[in-house]
């Protein structure tokens, strides 16, 4: 993968990346393959390893990067479901590329590199603006030693870009139909309510923690958290586990436990939700222990000139005007949003994380054309 001209077709690089079984947190050579390709285009590449996680930062041009492409070379396991092809063989059948990471997101990375190859060739190898890539090996895992650490490194060196494009497979039915400009926040809670064990025939001698736990859960779910906002759907709270561990029918247990998850919009923060939950819990269950964890706050990149450039480039290349959306789960964009405007756009993601993950080669090449248009848009 050292011939810059050959990189204008994303298929060889996508296949080479898929053949690296980089299941989180293993790299399996994926970032070396990518760094070699980028180096052949004139990029300065920096390997950044934190813990067991390998990351890559690459840039070309002078000054502050106008655009950064963010992505991940790690993938989820192949899983137990049967594949029709080796998940790490990158087989092409009937014009379709099969393999783990084809859509999420090695194919998107290869398409952006192909776009860079064509774009740089048109500019004689010297870009009109600086461009960078932030590639992590920890997006599908705990996301502790990946994008978060690289962003800190970038900030120290004044490498934060004017805009960041995350190559997640956002398209739903056809390439170009959806761009994510925000994501809901996600936080989880674990509550243990303490009681006093006893015989169910003598409840006056016991303190049933289940009753208190049920009152807490009812209070949490009795009313909707909100009705949504201009860009976000309503926040949701889902009970995910209730556990007593009591095999007997005539014993009041000593403790009861529940877990839940909240997906919240920009009307809330993790801190405001925690304060609300603590008030409800304290009122209904004085004897308890509770813990909260937030994997990401809600964020929104308000549509403006940068988003308009992205949308115009997608429309020009595909003939499709994308919907701006904030749905779905979380991505590393939640970390990038703390530093600069960010949006997500990439391949159709219907087969991601499934057996026979795949992408039509024509779609892969079409995405490279879209990304080249995005580079043009941010070079002006």
Image: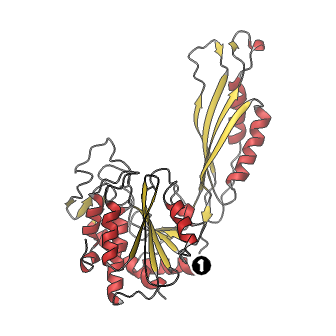
Q: Foreground residue, 258 or 171?
A: 258
Q: Nearer the viewer, residue 177 or 111?
A: 111
Q: Is residue 147 visible?
A: yes
Relative depth, front residue between 290 and 374 = 290
What x and y, as percent, mark residue 303?
59, 75
Q: In this view, does 320 lie above or below 198?
A: below
Q: Where is residue 368 in the image (x, y as percent from the top left)?
A: 34, 75
The colour scheme of the drawn protein is secondary structure
- The front one of 267 and 101 is 101
User: Residue 294: x percent and y percent?
Assistant: 61, 50
**Horizontally, is 249 left or right of 276 in the view?**
left
Q: Give the residue at x 50% y 79%.
A: 65
* Quadrant position of the N terminus in the picture: bottom left
Residue sitting at x 31%, y 59%: 29
Image x and y of residue 300, in percent: 61, 66
Structural crowding at the residue carrying mark 1, measured as other residues with C-alpha within 10 Å and reported as few (<14), some (14–19) or many (≥20): few
Task: In the displayed orientation, state which residue is furthest to the right.
Answer: 283
Residue 220: image quadrant is: top right
Number of numbered discs on residues: 1
Residue at 51 percent across and 72 percent down: it is: 164
Q: Answer with the quarter of the image where residue 5 lies.
A: bottom left
Is 164 rendered above or below residue 86? below
Q: Is 348 situated above or below 129?
A: above
Q: Return the residue at label 1.
A: 304
Can residue 318 be seen here? no
Identity of the residue furthest to the left in this view: 93
Badge 1 element: loop
**Image-based side of 216 in relation to 369, left or right:** right
């Amino acid at each position: 993968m050292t011939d810059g001209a050959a990189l204008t077709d994303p298929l060889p690089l996508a296949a080479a990346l898929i053949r690296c079984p980089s299941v989180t947190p293993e790299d399996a050579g994926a970032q070396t393959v990518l760094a070699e390709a980028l180096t052949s285009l004139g990029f300065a590449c920096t390997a950044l390893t934190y813990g067991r996680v390998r990351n890559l930062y690459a840039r070309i041009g002078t000054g502050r990067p106008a655009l950064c492409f963010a992505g991940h070379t790690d993938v989820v396991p192949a899983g137990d479901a049967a594949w029709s092809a080796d998940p790490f063989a990158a087989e092409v059948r009937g014009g379709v590329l099969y393999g783990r990471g084809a859509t999420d997101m090695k194919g998107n990375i290869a398409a952006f590199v192909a776009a860079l190859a064509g774009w740089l060739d048109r500019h004689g190898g010297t870009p009109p603006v600086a461009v960078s890539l932030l590639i992590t090996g920890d997006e599908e895992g705990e996301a502790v030693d990946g994008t978060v650490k690289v962003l800190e490194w970038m900030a120290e060196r004044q490498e934060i870009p004017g805009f960041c494009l995350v190559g997640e497979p956002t398209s739903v039915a056809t390439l170009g139909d959806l761009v994510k400009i925000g994501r809901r926040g996600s936080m989880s809670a674990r509550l243990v309510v303490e009681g006093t064990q006893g015989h169910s025939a003598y409840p006056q001698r016991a303190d049933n923690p289940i009753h208190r736990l049920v009152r807490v859960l009812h209070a949490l779910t009795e009313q909707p958290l909100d009705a949504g906002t201009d860009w976000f759907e309503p926040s949701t709270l889902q009970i995910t586990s209730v556990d007593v561990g009591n095999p007997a029918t005539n014993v009041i247990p000593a403790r009861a436990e529940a877990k839940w998850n909240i997906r919240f919009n920009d009307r809330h923060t993790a801190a405001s939700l925690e304060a609300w939950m603590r008030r409800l819990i304290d009122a209904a269950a004085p004897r308890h222990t509770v813990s909260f964890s937030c994997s990401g706050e809600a964020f929104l990149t308000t549509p403006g000139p940068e988003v308009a450039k992205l949308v115009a480039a997608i429309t020009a290349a595909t003939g499709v005007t994308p919907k701006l959306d904030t749905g779905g789960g979380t991505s590393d964009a939640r970390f990038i949003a703390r530093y600069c405007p960010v949006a997500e756009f990439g391949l159709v993601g219907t087969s991601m994380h499934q057996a026979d993950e795949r992408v039509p080669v024509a779609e892969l090449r079409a995405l490279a054309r879209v990304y080249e248009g995005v580079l043009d848009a941010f070079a002006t």
